[in-house]
Image (spheres, rainbow, N blue to C red):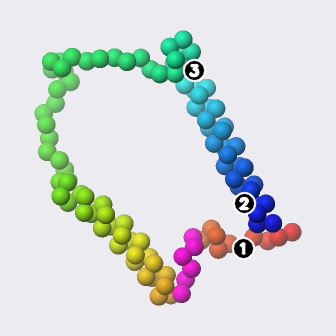
Amino acid sequence: MASKIKLMNILFDEICFILVLILFVVVKILMYGTDGGLYPTKRGFLCGDTSIQWPLKEESVPVEINDPLSYIIPVVVVSSYILLAFSKNLTLKPFIYQVKVKEF
């Protein structure tokens, strides 16, 4: 029974993906037409145009701080969750997999 449910979920996911893909192509064709392809027109700009020039601003978060934090925070969060789960003898499975399915 569980394998049928998994198969139904996979088929439903595939059908939803195909429907979204078809909808995406239809919207692209409606927006850009079929004569110019499915891509918007390319427009250039002049480097000397003063209306698009902005002063250079410094970075809000330096790279020396951003890079270590982007690795340290996920490792701390995941490892604390694992340690908490093992200390309370909990399973590491998400809640959705712990729900019992009533068989008919």
Q: Are marks 2 and 1 in contact (CB under 8 Å)?
A: no
Which percent across, then down, holds residue 44?
29, 17
Q: Nearer the viewer, residue 5 or 51?
A: 5
Q: Work out whether mark 1 precedes mark 3 in sequence or the reverse, and give the earlier one.
A: 3
Which percent across, then down, holds residue 73?
32, 67
Q: Main secondary structure of the magenta part?
A: loop
Which percent across, then down, holds residue 103?
82, 70
Regarding mark 2 in the picture, which secondary structure is present there? helix
Regarding mark 1 in the picture, which secondary structure is present there? loop
Question: Which mark identifies residue 100?
Answer: 1
Q: Kindly identify the amino acid type of the residue bearing the numbered disc 2.
A: Lys
The residue indicated by pointer 3 is 30
Figure quadrant of the N terminus? bottom right
Residue at screen point 63% across, 42% down: 17
Q: Kindly identify the amino acid type of the residue bearing the numbered disc 1.
A: Lys
Q: Residues within 10 Å of mark 2 (few under 14, many from 20)?
A: few
Q: Is residue 65 left or right of residue 20?
A: left
Residue at screen point 44% across, 20% down: 40
Q: Is residue 85 left or right of residue 100?
A: left
Q: CA distance from mark 2 to mark 3?
A: 36 Å
Magenta extent: 89-94
Residue at screen point 25% across, 18% down: 45
Query: Picture quarter containing residue 64?
Result: bottom left
Choose mark 2 or mark 3, whichever is in front: 2
The residue indicated by pointer 2 is 6
Q: Is residue 93 magenta?
A: yes
Residue at screen point 57% across, 20% down: 30
